[in-house]
């Protein structure tokens, strides 16, 4: 069994203020690092009323500064919303600062207003994601390459060689097929997609990435007095579950573990 942490940094009005939540997340990672936790997972969304973290790489830099062993896994970075050169640079520096403790799951995103915020045509999001994946590979080679008609080079290179692990995330069949073409493995949300990924890897003659670790409960709370603390915890659990279910209505395709 591996112990992990996950933060989305939602700060609804009835909870603690964002400044306290961000400070606590860094302190908790320092504590978890000493206790042997393996990974902290950070997510990304933009323009959320509750302040869902829009800058997980910055949050990760603070966490890596107070830890020595725990890995940070971005699950997921929404690649269509990032400039690929800047994303490659930021992740490379974070990988150096952490001595190679960075992992990345690349996601497509699904909230329409996020694409509008960043001037991305939603109809082109798959093409943009795949192009950004190609740029990451080229950028982390440390060699010059053509980018929009200009020869560029990205330095420094990441600490990990040839680069930090890149996984493809998704909740629909198309993501499984995409994962067989790009990256080091697949992180599906819904059951049945892993088998599609394996079949597509076999068809393409590509190696199958390591199977994702089994998932524990969505929420795990440890308390010396569960009945007392349940009253404190339950509003936050219900809020998160309801919010994720409401957001899931924007997906259009794919599945989610949160019931609508």
Image (tube, helix red, strand yellow):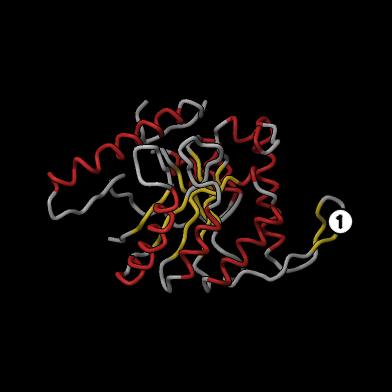
Q: Position of residue 85 (x, y in %)?
A: 71, 56
Q: Nearer the viewer, residue 214 or 26?
A: 26
Quadrant of the rendering where the C terminus is positioned? top left
Q: Position of residue 253 (x, y in %)?
A: 51, 28
Q: How many marks?
A: 1
Q: Residue at x 46, y 48 (%)?
A: 187
Relative horizontal placement of residue 195, taking residue 35 as reference (left or right): right
Q: Position of residue 81 (x, y in %)?
A: 64, 43
Sort mark 1 into few (<14), some (14-19) or many (20+) by Cα contacts within 10 Å.
few
Quadrant of the rendering where the N terminus is positioned? bottom left
Callout 1 secondary element: strand
Relative horizontal placement of residue 32, taking residue 117 as reference (left or right): left
Q: Residue at x 65, y 38 (%)?
A: 126
Which residue is denoted by mark 1 in the rendering? 150
Q: Residue at x 46, y 52 (%)?
A: 42
Decide: is 32 above or below 75.
below
The residue sitting at the right extreme is: 149
Q: Position of residue 175 (x, y in %)?
A: 54, 40
- Residue 115's image quarter? top right
Relative horizontal placement of residue 62, taking residue 31 as reference (left or right): right
- Residue 122's image quarter? top right
Q: Nearer the viewer, residue 57 or 110?
A: 57
Decide: is 155 above or below 148.
below
């Amino acid at each position: 069994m591996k112990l992990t942490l996950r933060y989305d940094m939602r700060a609804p009005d009835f909870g603690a203020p964002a400044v306290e939540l961000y400070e606590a997340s860094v302190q908790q990672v320092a504590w978890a690092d000493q206790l042997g936790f393996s990974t902290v997972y950070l997510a990304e969304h933009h323009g959320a009323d509750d302040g869902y973290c829009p800058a997980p790489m910055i949050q990760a830099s603070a966490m890596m500064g107070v830890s020595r062993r725990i890995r940070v896994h971005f699950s997921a970075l929404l690649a269509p919303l990032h400039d690929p050169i800047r994303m490659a640079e930021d992740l490379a520096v974070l990988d150096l600062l952490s001595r190679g403790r960075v992992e990345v799951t690349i996601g497509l995103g699904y909230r329409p207003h996020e694409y509008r915020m960043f001037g991305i045509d939603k109809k082109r999001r798959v093409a943009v994601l795949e192009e950004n994946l190609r740029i990451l590979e080229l950028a982390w080679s440390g060699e010059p390459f053509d980018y929009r008609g200009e020869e560029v080079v990205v330095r420094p290179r990441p600490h990990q060689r040839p680069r930090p692990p890149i996984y493809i995330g998704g909740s629909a069949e198309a993501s499984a097929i995409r994962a067989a073409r790009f990256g080091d493995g697949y992180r599906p949300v819904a059951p049945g997609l892993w088998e599609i990924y394996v079949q597509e890897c076999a068809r393409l003659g590509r190696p199958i990435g390591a199977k994702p670790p089994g998932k524990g409960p969505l929420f795990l709370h440890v308390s010396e007095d569960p009945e007392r603390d349940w009253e404190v915890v339950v509003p936050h659990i219900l809020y998160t579950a309801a919010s994720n279910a409401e957001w899931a209505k924007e997906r259009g395709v794919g599945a989610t573990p949160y019931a609508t």
